[in-house]
Image (tube, rainbow, N blue to C red):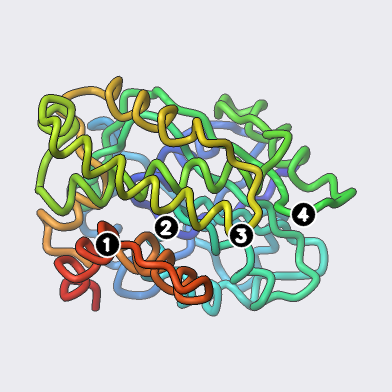
Amino acid sequence: MIRRVLLVGAGAIGMLHAVKLARNREVELRLFADAARRRRYLENGLFFNGEKINFDFADAAFEPELIVIATKFCQYREALEMISPYVKKKTILLPVLNGISSVSLAKERFPGAEVVGAFFLGHASVRTGTCVSHDGVGTTYLGVTEKSLSSAAFEVKNLFDAVGISAEIPADMRAALWKKFILNVGVNQTSAFFRADYGTIQQNPPMLDFARQLMREALEIARREKVNVSDSAVDEAMKVICTMPARAKTSMLQDVEAGRETEIELFSGELLRRAEKYQLDLPANRKVWEKLKPQCR
């Protein structure tokens, strides 16, 4: 079993994994943070559901078998550079990010590295400063995005099973990533565009229609990219949106409300760039991009 783990990113998603890893005595978990973040964490503490969680920070001698990267996409490239001293021949990289490009970016930075794609699907976490809260509902999906004989995804799943993190390996990870991406394109962007929580969206037919239009545009790009995603992906995503806790807020809405950099580049920005190849117009996603882009530094 994997025993030495480095975590990069102690935010809404990172903490969901970090807490269970930290509580297992057989796992040696270290937190990676730059000087400013380390100082902030030491001064303010890191809290999960009101409980202070104590972490040890990684030093230069630490040799992780697994590096979990749970930053925002806006900080992802910087994170890849910062972890480079820790990446060895057999190190497994696990980016747990929204979007469809985190695996390819990690492989581009570390050619030949073991990179396992991952995403979390469940109820939204809430992050306020260094405090994260979550109701425990959700699963982390793991896998490689190309045909491979690598056992890395199974090694990570064995670790997660051992520490109590709900995890699954889809039969088609590329399709699974795109389905989650389509959902995010719809609900994250709609919530940020209208500054609306799930309950407001659920009770507002025009907002639901807007989310559906955003997702249909994403589905069209998936078809052009020859991703094995069926027409039912949008309807399945709508069911998820309509069954989320009414008072919950997407991470993108939380970022807008807190004045933080959003992941607009990851959603409509990514789609608009890909649409150029096919000379397609994506009016709903362009509308979101034009409104929210100024907040993306």
Q: Circle 4 is placed at which residue position? A: 146
Disc number lying in front (3 or 4):
3
Query: Which residue type does callout 3 highlight?
Result: Glu
Instruction: Report the Cα–Cα distance between label 1 and label 2.
Output: 34 Å
| Dot 3 crowding, Cα within 10 Å, few <14, some 14–19, many 20+ | few
- CB under 8 Å between discs 3 and 2: no
Q: Quadrant of the C terminus?
A: bottom left
In the figure, is residue 40 to the left or right of 84? Answer: left
Query: Badges 4 and 1: C-beta atoms under 8 Å apart?
Result: no
Q: Which mark is residue 225?
A: 3
Horizontal and vertical percent position of residue 123 = 34, 29
Q: Residues within 10 Å of mark 2 (few under 14, many from 20)?
A: many
Q: Residue at x 68, y 52 (%)?
A: 116
Q: Amino acid at mark 2?
A: Gly
Q: Which residue is under mark 1? A: 283
Left or right: residue 175 compared with residue 273: right
Determine which residue is flagged by label 2.
9
Which is closer to the viewer, label 4 or label 1? 1
**Residue 79 appears at what percent x and percent y?**
48, 71
For badge 4, the amino acid type reads: Glu
Q: How many marks?
A: 4
Residue at mark 4 to residue at mark 2: CA–CA distance: 26 Å
3 or 2: mark nearer the eye = 3
